[in-house]
Structure formats: C-alpha cells, structure tokens
Amino acid sequence: MGDITTYWQHFFRENKESQDWWHKKKALCKKRKAQIVKIKGKGIVLSRQSYDTIRNTGYAVHLVYLMKQGDFFYTEEQIIPYQLTEKSNGEVKHQYIEKPPAENTSNQIPVLKQENMKQSKRQIEYNRLEAVKYAERWWNSFNPEYRRFEDDCTNYISQCLRAGGGPMWGEPVRERGWWYGRDSWSFSWSVAHSFRWYLSGSERGIRGIEVEQPEELNPGDVICYDFDGDGAWNHTTIVVAKDADNMPLVNAHTNNSRNRYWSYEDSAAWTPEIQYKFFRIEIS
C-alpha cells in the first residue's frame, strides 16, 4: 500500500497530465470555469495476483475534490479503478482500468411495448428529497436488500426512484412495467436501454417528461446516456444538486461517483457522438 500512496502523492504533486482521465478532468474544469482547490484520497486494495515474474494488484482510488466555481464551493467524489503491475526486474506500472460505465444493451433486450403502459387512476407525488437522500446514502456502497449487478448503474437509479415513492408494477413479466422481485426483475429496472425507453413511454407509475436542456432538471431527475450515439443507451445517472451555473451534478454507480458534472466529458466512455436524454420524473 505504501507504493500506491507514494505514486499518487507524486502524481498530484507533479500535476501530471499523462493520464487521459486526469487531462479530461482538468479540461472540463477549465470549460466550466471551475477550480480543484484541494484533493484528498485513499486507496483500497481489491485483488492480488502473482504469476512467474509479475505481481498484479487491483485497487480503487477514492478521490474527494473540493471544487470552487466562482463563489460556490462543493465536494465531488469519484472512485477510479487502477492496477499496479510489479515485475521482478524492478519495473513498476500503475494503469487506469478503462471500464466505462456501460450495461448490456444488446438489441436482444426488448423495449417495453406501448400497450403495457396504460394510465393508472392512482396519483402519487414523487418525493424528490427521499430519492436524493437514498442516492447520497448508497452512491459508493450497495444496499443488501437488492441484488448487486456488475454493471449497476440503472439498478442503483431504480432504487433511488423507488425510495422516492415510485410504484412498481408488471411482475412477473420481465418485458412489462418496472419492478424488482426476490428472484427476478423487469428489464427496465436494471438495463439502461430498456429504462430509457420505459421512462419516455410510460403512462403508469414512474414516467419521464423529456426536457430539452439539462438546466431544466431538478434534484431527483434522471439523465440517460448513449455514449457512442448509435442508439444503444449505456448509462443512467440521477441529479442530486445544481452547480453555480444551474447545471446538474449527478450520482452514479458502476464507476461510482458523487456530485459529478452531468456531461461526463471527463469519462473514458465519452465520445463526440454522445447523446443525452433529460427526464423530469413524475408519478402517474
């Protein structure tokens, strides 16, 4: 652990930009006229493997940034996956593990059919405060009451909306509704692509009202991401706060993050072709 600590102290002291993610982070800050005032962090060892003359240590870095944007201060947190490779000849390498936040969005995953989304007579108010409180409580851990997915982003967002009073319906048909059960769940609960289309088509329970601009969103609302612009929706985040320019700050799972700037321009998954959908959440 000492080698990891030394590496990161040197990394930030020398203000390196050799790592792509750090270059993107600084570029996004410059674009937003935001400044990283202070950085704190800790490393968490996740795995160790040794074979022949090589030893690999998988670890995560939990970084906490104190951000300043004009007179506005806030903290942003991010979990970054890395691997330390040590060779018997003394060579040492720290490598960012480029696992972008993405889910299985195979075309085999069905989009929910419109006839399954009929209007409910029951009206419930969406509790944004409870949704955001849940998002803050579980942004970097996993609620044991739910299954943990390898690509967990949409499962996490669904849990947040459920905490905000979102009614489940459609069980046990996986292609229908939005629900989570002990041994099964709807595609819309856990798959980003299905969730995006459920929000835009639903007239029952949780539904998304699409807006044109991110600044129209409020805490408790949702953003969906198609990183490659190819029609396959890969990622989902929840708005938890707004910055000095009234832009959303979001929480997410998979690559866990808190109060991250909504555009994801600092992500390894970002491409110039990225598409977004901005949904104001309501309950019908």
Image (cartoon, rainbow, N blue to C red):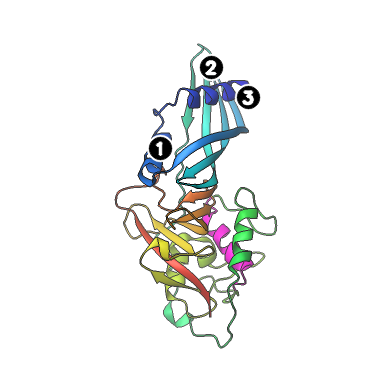
Amino acid bearing label 2: Thr
Q: Note whether residue 184 is visible.
A: no
Front tag of 3 and 2: 3
Q: Which residue is mark 3?
A: 1
Q: Residue at x 42, y 39 (%)?
A: 25
Secondary element at tag 1: helix
Q: Residue at x 51, y 59 (%)?
A: 239
Q: Which residue is mark 1?
A: 26
Q: Foreground residue, 96 or 64?
A: 64
The Cα–Cα distance between marks 2 and 1, rounded to whole angstroms, is 36 Å
Secondary element at tag 3: loop
Q: What is the span of residues highlighted in magenta in the rendered image?
A: 151-166
Q: Foreground residue, 259 or 4?
A: 259
Is 182 colored magenta in this rendering?
Answer: no
Amino acid bearing label 1: Lys
Secondary element at tag 2: loop
Query: Is 1 rendered above or below residue 185?
Result: above
Is 152 colored magenta in this rendering?
Answer: yes
Q: Note whether residue 34 is visible.
A: yes
Q: Residue at x 51, y 22 (%)?
A: 10
